[in-house]
Amino acid sequence: MRSFFDLNSNSEFHLPISFVGCGSATPQTIISNAELGERVDTSDEWIKSRTGIRQRRVIGANESLIDLATHAARNALKMAKWDEKTIDLIILATSTPEDLFGSAPKIQSNLGASNAAAFDLTAACSGFLFALVTASQYLISGSMKRIIVIGADQLSKWVDWDDRSTCVLFGDGAGALAIEASHENKGLIGYSLKSDGNRGGCLNLAHSNIFEDLVNEASHQRGDYLPIRMEGKEVYKFAVKEVPIILGELLEKYNIHSGSIDWLLLHQANQRILDAVAARFSIPSEKVLSNLENYGNTSAATIPLMLDEAVRDKRIKSGDLIACSGFGAGLSWGAALFYWHGSY
């Protein structure tokens, strides 16, 4: 049995970062489990009992991922009470950009954040947490003061909607977080990131291996991708093993008892994973944030989407301690401990 010290003994570990605003946006179109059952051999009971999902959102013809990401970022800016001209950096965590050369600069333009640099970061379902840690380095170094981190994905483009094992899991959405350098508030405590490419085949969205004639005997590879492929049992075993380990190591490193955690905020992939991790740390269900029944797995968007929902309905309050973990394709996973300081 691990022994942890009291939370209040760790003030020296708090990094000079404050989490001050959040926002989210989801598509208008809702696809229920029952509706999916009209296309593939499945049912509401089958999906809900295995995943916890009841419905998901899908981007329609009059919407776009960039529009959702922009809207989420604007909501975060409004909560933080920032002028868009004061943003130094925008990081978009996505595996489904509208432009393979990068979608973040378009969001920067939409926001009117003329003084901000912008770039995309790809780490699938771990993307938002990886982007958050990346952003924190600029703030810690003192080179930047205000950053918007966005998680947004449109996995509906890459799902095989005739494959029951994957099409029931995913949805589209966007979430954003405003973070700033601050020497007054306790914010980010610590983090840990990991990857294991040896297990990457368990979950991927691979490039097609189709070559076409070019000239003479030369050929070129077609720019196309295959649908999402996932070995569900292996991904589940990976998550329920690795997430408790990385969170446990982080809690031990900073001498924080799991009982001091106000909220457990995990990547929203499967309710059984959330329940298993919470049980490992004896965290009661009322402290486990979950909204996947309404959105499914929105990849990089799940964590900021859930955070925004809980802040706006006043479950999360200023000063609350949040234990967060993202995990998914790569395989990649990570954890972070931070205090929320925004107000709504």
Image (cartoon, grey):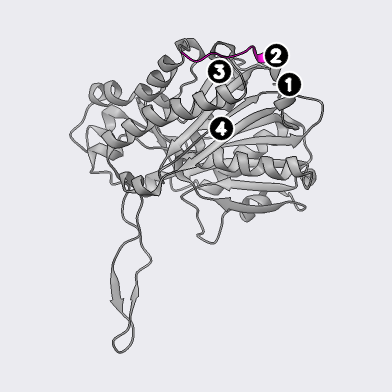
Q: Main secondary structure of the magenta part?
A: loop
Disc 3 versus disc 4: nearer the observer: 3
Q: Which mark is residue 8?
A: 2
Q: Is residue 274 left or right of residue 210?
A: right
Residue lying farthest to the right in this orientation: 184
Kind of residue indicated by mark 1:
Ser
Residue 96 in the image, given as x and y percentages of width and height: 46, 50
Q: Which mark is residue 263?
A: 3
Crowd band around label 4 with a 10 angstrom C-alpha radius: few (<14), some (14–19), many (20+): many
Residue 253 in the image, given as x and y percentages of width and height: 59, 25
Crowd band around label 3 with a 10 angstrom C-alpha radius: few (<14), some (14–19), many (20+): many
Marks 2 and 4, the one that precedes in the sequence: 2
* Residue ID for mark 1: 11
Task: Name the residue: 76% across, 44% down.
Answer: 141
Kind of residue indicated by mark 2:
Asn
Residue 268 in the image, given as x and y percentages of width and height: 44, 29
- What span is colored magenta in the figure? 1-7
Q: Are marks 1 and 4 in contact (CB under 8 Å)?
A: no
| 131 lies above or below 80 | below
| 330 lies above or below 77 | below
Q: Are marks 1 and 2 in contact (CB under 8 Å)?
A: yes
